[in-house]
Amino acid sequence: MNVALIDGGYFVKRLQKHWLPDIYGNMKFWNDKFERKKIGIDELNENLYRILDNDIKYLEIIMDKIKKFDKVIVMYDGIYARRARGKYYKNYKRNRSGINALKHKGIDITQKIEKCLFDPYQLRPLWISEMDMFKEADDLIGEYIEENPMEKITIFSTDGDMYQFLNRENVSIHNFTKTITKQEIEDKIGLPIEKYVSWKTLVGDSSDNLPGMRGYGPQRAKNLLQDYKSFHSIPTGFFIIHYIPAHTVQDVSNSLKKYRKSNNLSLKKVLMNYGSWWKRIEDGKKVNLNKMEYDSLCDVLSEKISCVIEDHNPFLKNQHRVIKLPFKE
C-alpha cells in the first residue's frame, strides 16, 4: 500500500500567508471587503473556499507526479503539543512565540480550515486527518511509521526533523518541491543517516530554538561522531566543560611555555600529543576544555588549574529526547 503522510504545517504556512495584510486577492483582502460591506457573506465564503481549494489542488498535482496513493493522511499539531517537550526544554520553539513551551497554547488550525468551508478531517473525499491535542504532527507521523513497517510511505513536509526517518527503507520524503534522498542528507552531514539525530543534538536546530552543544558546528560534530555509534555512546567527559578565567590564562600560558622549554618539546610535538587547545592557551586566548583535556593540562603542570565547570550532559540528553521522533517521555 502506498501512503502519503502530509505534515499539517503546510496548511498553517499557507493560511498565515493568506491572512497577511496588503496582498491583493488573499483571504484577508476578501475578509476586509466583507467587513467594509463591499461584498456579501456568500462571495466571501466563495473566495475563502477557492483559495484553500487551490492549495489542496497544488498538493494533489505534486502527489500525482510521484505515484498513485492508496491512502492520504493529513497530520495536524495539537494546540498543547509543545508542552510535553517543554518538560525537558522550556525554551523549545520559544523563538516563534516568545512563550515558555510548558505554557504554550497553539492555534487550532482546524478552525481556520473550517472557516474556509472545508472539513479539516476530510479535505478530500478519500483523505483523512488526525490530530492529538498534546502531540505534534511529527509525532503522529513517527507513530504511524512505527506501526506500519510494511507500507510504502511518502512524507510531505519541509521539516528537517523528518530526515531521521530516511533510515527506513519504506520511507521517502518530499518537501513540496523535490524528493529528499538518504544520500543527500548523508552527504550533507558526512555521516550515516542513523547518526542524524545525534548529529543534530550536537549542532542544534535554530528553527526549533535548540542551541546544541557550545563550540560544536557541523564539522566538529561529524568528527566526534565518526568515532562513536551514537550520541549516547560518547563518553560524558566530552561535555563536561572547564572554563579557564581570562585572568588565569596568561599564568597558565607561561607555565606551558616553561614546560615545553624545560622538556625540549616543539610546539608541533605537543599539538600532536595534546591537541589544539595547547596553542590557544600559549597564545593567551580564552579556552574551554573538556574533562579529558583539562585533566591532561593539570597532569602536565602537576597542579589543579582554577576553572568554572559546567556539565552539559543532562541538557544534551534532554535535547536528544526532544529531537528524536516520535517523542517519548
Image (cartoon, helix red, strand yellow):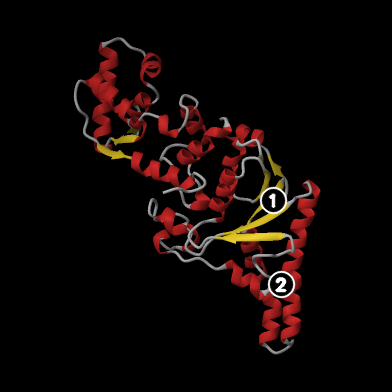
Left or right of 318, for residue 263: left
Q: Is residue 226 above or below residue 142?
A: above
Residue 80 image point, x, y percent: 47, 63
Q: Is residue 283 above or below residue 67?
A: above
In this orientation, which residue lies closer to the viewer: 119 or 162? Answer: 119
Mark 1 / mark 2, whichever is N-terminal? 1
In this orientation, which residue lies closer to the viewer: 67 or 97? Answer: 67
Q: CA distance from mark 1 to mark 2?
A: 28 Å
Residue 143 image point, x, y percent: 55, 48
Q: Amino acid at mark 1?
A: Ala
Residue lying at 51% horizontally and 32% vertically, measured from the top left? 219
Of marks 1 and 2, the one in the foreground: 1
In this orientation, which residue lies closer to the viewer: 248 or 56? Answer: 56
Other residues around mark 1 within 10 Å, as few (<14) / some (14–19) / many (≥20): many
Q: Quadrant of residue 272?
A: top left
Q: Quadrant of residue 6?
A: bottom right
**Helix or strand or loop: what does disc 2 sit on?**
loop
**Mark carried by residue 26:** 2
| Image quarter in which the N terminus is found | top right
Residue 104 image point, x, y percent: 44, 64
Other residues around mark 2 within 10 Å, as few (<14) / some (14–19) / many (≥20): some
Residue lying at 28% horizontally and 38% vertically, measured from the top left? 246
Q: Badge 1 is on which residue?
A: 4
Residue 175 image point, x, y percent: 68, 49
Q: Amino acid at mark 2?
A: Asn
In this orientation, which residue lies closer to the viewer: 37 or 166? Answer: 166
